[in-house]
Image (cartoon, rainbow, N blue to C red):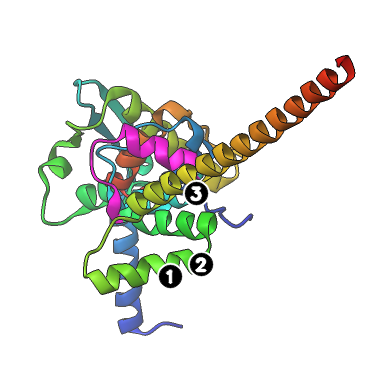
Amino acid sequence: MMGKGGEAAASAQHKEENEEEGDMVGVVKLISAEGFEFVIDKKAAMVSNTLRNMLTSPGGFAETREGEVRFPEISTAILEKICQYFYWSLHYASGKETAEFPIEPEITLELMMAANYLDT
Amino acid sequence: MEPERKPLSLLELCFRSAVDNLRYMNSVDNLEMGLLKRILPHCTLEQLTHIESCTEMDLTGVTDVLWKRFFQREFGEADMNVAIKRMKESGVRYKWKKLFEEKTEKQKQVEQRMSAGLRNKYEAANAGTQYAGINLVCMKLF
């Protein structure tokens, strides 16, 4: 049985979990260098540690408020591949996906730079 | 419930893809040195030569140690130590790529000299045999 302090702690933890869940709900718009917009689930975007920090930072990045992040240095083709990776990663973790994530040799280096920036 | 599987990071997948496709790699301009440090050590001598010739930025920071390794593999530890000693004595530090190229050129010249010497000796010996043959024919005739 939990005491009052325990209840408060549990409540705080529950609140924190809800907040975290709340952070994961909804969609976010990723905009490529050419202005192409990808609307993806927040949960998927948070596969990237950089995006996670941007979207959950209490300091209030403009990205957090507006729900959109611009990438002036990432081309549309690369950003599309990154979005595909986010969903692949989620599906793989849940066991729905078993195949390897394919990376075409000709985009490897550009994708690597973007992956490095996005910490993903 | 099944435990969650941890997928490989996209960065790790890119590293693997890059290493698998080194033979197709050309310029690595704009790539951070930290990333290159993970890729280029997997290159063969020919691949590294090709990548460096296609890349405008100076890769010495990453490739010098690799060229030193190629030097050691190609010419042996004794020659490598001689090169290190000479650099220490002269107080001048050369890039290992440059040392590798110069040593290769020097070796090529030695080989050319040796093969030219052998060719000359063979030709001289051959001419001698022919001369002896002609003498023999002349003796038979007269």
Pointer 2: what residue?
B77
Pointer 1 or 3: first along the chain: 3
Q: Are marks 2 and 3 on the same chain?
A: yes
**Mark 3 Cα within 10 Å, few/some/many (few <14, many 20+)?**
some
Q: Secondary structure at mark 1?
A: helix
| Left or right of residue A5, residue B68 in this image | right
Pointer 3: what residue?
B42
Q: Which residues are magenta?
A: B45-61
Marks counted in the figure total: 3
Residue A109: percent from the left, percent from the top?
37, 36
For the residues labelled 1 and 3, the Cα–Cα distance comes to 24 Å
Position of B71 relative to B138 (above/below): below
Residue A11: percent from the left, percent from the top?
32, 69
Q: Nearer the viewer, mark 2 or mark 3?
A: 2
Question: Which mark is drawn over residue B81?
Answer: 1
Give the residue drawn at x 42%, y 44%. Answer: B105
Quadrant in which the C terminus of chain B is drawn? top right
